Image (spheres, helix red, strand yellow):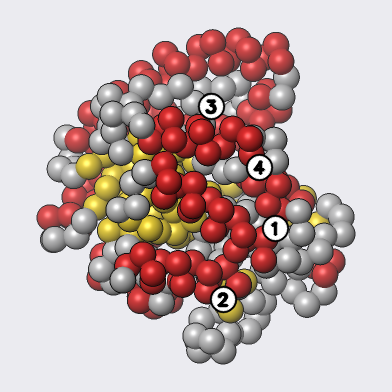
Amino acid sequence: MRMRGVTYDTGFLSEGTSTHPNFDAANVYREMEIIRRDLHCTAVRVTGGEPVRLEIAAQAAAAAGLEVWFSPFTNDLDQDELLVLLADCAERAERLRTSGAEVVMVTGAELMLFTRGFFPGETLPDRLAALSEPTKSRAALAKLPTLLNGFLERAVDVVRARFGGRVTYASLPTEPVNWEPFDFITVDAYNSAEIAHLYADSIKKLAGSHKPLVISEFGCTTFKGAFDLGARGMFIVEWDGARAVRLTGSYERDESEQSRYFNESVAVFEEAGVDTAFWCTFASHNLPFDEDPNNDFDRASYGIVKVLKDTLGTTYPGLPWEPKEVFYTIAARNAVAEA
């Protein structure tokens, strides 16, 4: 692969709560250095809903020598509000690019679920409910190609008027995207038990298209059986916005699930000729580790580090987390690829 990376969440906003409540710029700079130096990553996808935070993280990533994927990830904005935010982000990304950094601008993510106007419902829970209702979902999916691609054409125009680098969009596999206006085909591609028999062939097919394929998200969570769930591993938690309330049952902690998922996924990507892939994610600050199995929300985390409650780690003194097994798995495989 040309680039190997992780996503870095600066704070996804949901119902007044954030997935990164204690954003600290100094820590961000240290973590980007760790991502480049110790994980041997060559790119980072910076996500979140606040442009100022995105810019800080993007600057930190560039300073560490990483290719920066400037990727606004918003929730419950309408289309016009999102265009305003994309214009702001494109200007910030262009300032960074013209300073000498390698920057790719991403025109949003998973819009059919997280932006109003593509699927019925004013809130994310409403849209998820509509998706599970056959009558509503059939009618909405029939209109989706026109609505989605019409918006993306407007988004590309807004971004390219302000940003001179490469542009893409982070799509769900089911979104009917017209990729012609973009420089990359970019798809969230989580394997799971339901699609395991189709996964490798589908990645090969996408990678055989006329543009480079980027996997914007892949990964699994941190309990026994999470490998088979893929993108659904986070739903072992009951949520209140972006805040975890409780685990929905008893789940055995198993960090090896993530390592196996990473190695098997990357093997597929390498064989298919994927351009770039981002493990999701570096840290889930809203899902802290707890010694008490009933309160160990890190079991539902895709993070490669476990976030600690009210204490600091020892592997990287001063930072509020400790590496998980997959941290070292990623580091070792990337080091070989970089050599």
Q: Nearer the viewer, mark 1 or mark 2?
A: 2
- Return the residue at label 1: 300
- Return the residue at label 2: 323
Q: Residue at x 41, y 77 (%)?
A: 38
Q: Is residue 142 above or below residue 238?
A: above
Please tell me which of labels 1 and 2 falls first in the chain: 1
Query: Judging from the image, what secondary structure is the residue with disc 1 in?
Result: helix
Q: Is residue 196 above or below residue 243?
A: above
Please tell me which of labels 1 and 3 falls first in the chain: 3
Separation (CA) of disc 4 from disc 3: 15 Å
Separation (CA) of disc 4 from disc 2: 24 Å
> Can you see residue 22?
no
Query: Judging from the image, what secondary structure is the residue with disc 3 in?
Result: loop
Q: Is residue 333 above or below residue 86?
A: below
> Can you see residue 302?
yes
Separation (CA) of disc 3 from disc 2: 33 Å
**Amino acid type of the residue that numbered disc 4 sits on in the rendered structure:** Ser
**Disc 3 and disc 2 in contact, CB within 8 angstroms:** no
Callout 3 crowding tier (Cα within 10 Å): few <14, some 14–19, many ≥20: few
Callout 4 crowding tier (Cα within 10 Å): few <14, some 14–19, many ≥20: many
- Return the residue at label 3: 174
Residue 131 image offset from top left, x and y in percent: 66, 24
- Return the residue at label 4: 192
Q: Residue at x 29, y 64 (%)?
A: 66
